[in-house]
Image (cartoon, helix red, strand yellow):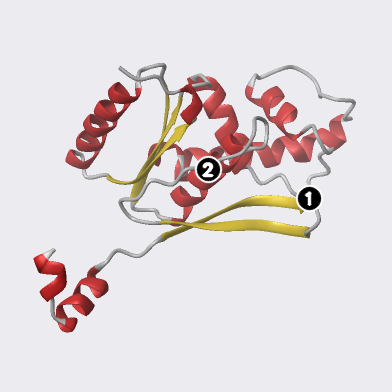
Amino acid sequence: WSKQIHTTFADAMRELSLRPATTKTKWEVGNVVGGGFRKTEQVEFYPADITIFCAPTSHGKTMILMQSAVDLVRSNPNKTYLYISCEENHLQLIERALNVSLNLNGTGIQEGTRKKVIKHYTGNRVGTPYNYTEAEYTPIKTAIERGVAEFEQTIWGRLKLIHTDATAEAICKNITAVVEELENNGQEVGGVFIDYIQLLSTD
């Protein structure tokens, strides 16, 4: 109290100038009920803060978190991010990360089949899926191959995907240990995502 009451204005301004900037990210929105069409929504994360996304089941919280994480990895090339899921296993997390990171616009992909086509490709399944002819599927496959290569080069090493059924206390201890390990190896951790709060148990 005393420090805050008696601080000089110059000291206060100096502290403000040293405060870390917010981290901005965005995700795809699409059609907004009653609000027309917006391609993306932007949010700012404040340093050392906890941000909680709240919405009913099946309203896209996981997709928003994954899009935010992938976008932050792309826009902050010197930082690493942890994405922890209490619901989806490690392979499901990889599929979801690929689904939100791959740019398949303009490839003629049918609405609603994007995730299934990526799953078809990553599963190394034979033939063309979903009534595509070979001529239709070839450019889509090429785009996926290009996107997967870009994902490996620019995202994979700095987006750490983790599945766990540990308690909230154990998750916090593991986060601390992993952050320390990464920082000892020269990787600065820019943020941690946990999906999702209703599944957290406690000791």
Label 1 vs label 2, nearer the camera: 2
Disc 1 from disc 2: Cα separation: 31 Å
Q: Which mark is residue 64?
A: none
Contact between labelled residues 2 and 1, with CB atoms less than 8 Å apart = no
Q: Quadrant of the N terminus?
A: bottom left
Q: Quadrant of the C terminus?
A: top left
Q: Position of residue 186 (x, y in %)?
A: 21, 45
Left or right of 139? Residue 168 is left
Depth order, front residue of 80/22: 22
Disc 1 is placed on an element classified as: loop
Name the amino acid, label 2. Answer: Phe
Give above or below for 112 relative to 10: above
Number of numbered discs on residues: 2
Name the amino acid, label 1. Answer: Gly
Depth order, front residue of 37/107: 37
Disc 2 is placed on an element classified as: loop
Left or right of 140? Residue 96 is left
Left or right of 152? Residue 201 is left
Q: Position of residue 70 (x, y in %)?
A: 51, 45
Q: Earlier in the sequence, mark 1 or mark 2?
A: 2
- Tell me which residue sits at (48%, 22%) in the image: 199
Q: Which residue is mark 1?
A: 106
- Tell me which residue sits at (62%, 56%) in the image: 41
Quadrant for residue 131, please give it. Answer: top right
Q: Residues within 10 Å of mark 2 (few under 14, many from 20)?
A: few
Q: Position of residue 198 (x, y in %)?
A: 50, 26
Depth order, front residue of 144/194: 194
Q: Which residue is mark 2?
A: 53
Give above or below for 131 relative to 188: above
